[in-house]
Amino acid sequence: MEDRENYNPNTVRLWRAYKTAKEMCMDRGYNILEDDTTLTLDQFKDKFCDENGEVQRNRLNFSAEPSEDMMRKHALPPTKHNPDPAPSCGRIWVEFNSEDNVGLKHLREYMGHLMQDNFYVGILITPKPVTGMGLRLLRSLSSTDAGPPGGIEVFVEQDLLVNITKHELVPKHVLLSREEKAQLLERYRLRETQLPRIQVTDPVAKYLGLKRGQVVKIIRKSETAGRYASYRWAI
Amino acid sequence: MSHDVVEIDPEEEVSTNAPVARPVNKRNLDTALKHARMLEIRKRIEREILDSVEILISFPSSTDADPKRPSAHDAAQFCKLVKDFQPSDFQELIEERNISGQCGYALCPRPKSKAPSTAKKQCVWTDNGPEIVDRKMLEIWCSKDCTRRALYVQAQLNQTPAWLRQGGIDDEIELMVDKAEERPQIVLPLRPKEVAPQPAKQEAPANDADDIAAAWLARDDALAALAMERGEKPGPLSRDDEDNEHLVTNTIKERVGNSEPPVAPSLARDAQSHLAIEGHVPRSDRKAAKDGDGDSENSEGEESDWDLDLS
């Protein structure tokens, strides 16, 4: 690591949040350039800072396309009416908000933008937590059809300073596709309600953008067995 | 509740995939439905509050509206929307309005005031001397008057969330009327208590019978009010009684003390009263009965004053 004393702390924070956001999208299966996740602070500064050394947050926004793998993972089973359904994933838009307080108004604007440009999911990264009413709006979005089909996720910059999945105590979480989930339930003769659960508000679940009903495989290291897999049903 | 229902295995009950068309314990079904309805109502109301806040962010309808004299339509709508709020919801409405740069009072079209400087903490002079407050606190309202008006409304809001409010409590929101600016301090709305029936001593004894009748009437009124507060009929229904779903089928009766005055105990009443120990008369024939039984001391049906509980 270089000498960070010379940099504005705000720049360093944003650099780290940006890298984590990119890594997060990559771990979810979007097409992200490898270079973006290994960006050095100098490169970041050259790319996104104006002449005063201030980071221009609107330059940080990016969109990403899902990769082939991800499309396969999110494929829906074909039905009679729809023999070739579109996978339940799509383009993502990641926006770094510069407002101090994000309220209903901003969320509505953001939703409008997502809908207009046909994004499937949106991630909003804010410097401060969203207001209470904003959280309520986000909660109500999941139960109604308003907003983009994949929903909106909001992260606070603070939470993205460190990529939590890189920590040694955090085991690897792998999302299972519908098919894999069916196989799992078949193999162990389970109903999905009989699986252990994970909350969708769990930090790793939020990182992976889990939706209710999805199943993750958690692979831990084990002294006796080498590797040990367990499964969690997101709720 | 029928008695010939099949008891459900608790394991099966947990599963959500189980087929529905099975003989189900009616009581369990009722309970589940009741709770599901309550949740549904709660969700609906939360959604309504969210919608209300979104409407109120872009209030009032015209830019030259006067917060002192809001148009009748605006005022009526404001009162209607705000009625289901809790004070915390109202605070959030103020916060949302501030984010969009408006004065916190929803009937005021002016922008919020600017603090004298951009420092994070600022010193202001109040009645209690200088005070250091956040800059945010200074940038909520456009004027003192709006503060007063908004807090006047907030003070009237019900603390209980709207989905728990019982029927029968008539909470109309009242706006601060125009003359308020002459009043020096905030006057909270008065909720007059119901006048308790007077002991009626100062009246002449001539209309004694009338007084007694009035007192009985007042008592009936009070009982009716109590019943209404419990959500019983008659009276406006509480929210979750919309489908007359009652899990508790027992009717509650107000316990009214019987009208006979208590009588002081007298010695002459009972011949054995001299044997009583704090009101209890020990039976004198027990020993004799025991002796008659002989030595069967642990016979089953035997009564004794004491009991050694070995189990």
Image (cartoon, coloured by chain):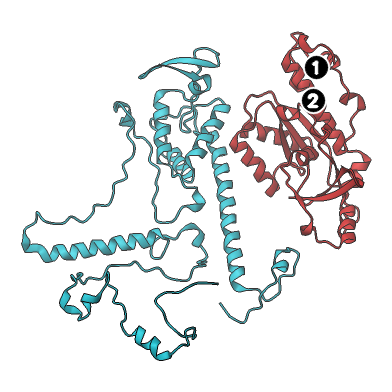
Q: Dot 1 lies on which element?
A: helix
Residue at position x 22%, y 65% in the image:
B216
Closer to the camera in the image, B1 or B169: B1
The disc numbered 2 marks a residue on which chain? A
Q: Colour of chain A?
A: red
- Between A226 and A102, the residue placed more toward the observer is A226
- Look at label 1 and name its amino acid: Phe
Q: Tag 2: residue type?
A: Tyr
Whether residue A82 is visible: no
Tag in front: 1 or 2: 2
Mark 1 or mark 2: name the one nearer the start of the chain. 2
Q: Dot 1 corresponds to which residue?
A: A48
Query: How far apart are the two marked residues, 1 and 2, measured between alpha carbons?
Result: 11 Å
Q: Is residue B154 left or right of residue B2?
A: left
Residue at horizontal 85 percent and vertical 31 percent from the top: A23
Give yes or no for contact between labels 1 and 2 (Cβ–Cβ under 8 Å). Answer: yes
Q: Secondary structure at mark 2?
A: helix
Please state the chain letter of the residue tagged with numbered disc 1 in the rendered image.
Answer: A
Residue ID for mark 2: A18
Tell me residue B167's x, y (percent). Answer: 43, 56
Q: Nearer the viewer, residue B239 or A171?
A: A171
Q: Position of residue A41 (x, y in %)?
A: 83, 16
Do discs 1 and 2 belong to a common subunit? yes
B279 to B131, vertically: above or below = below
Q: Position of residue B8 (x, y in %)?
A: 68, 73
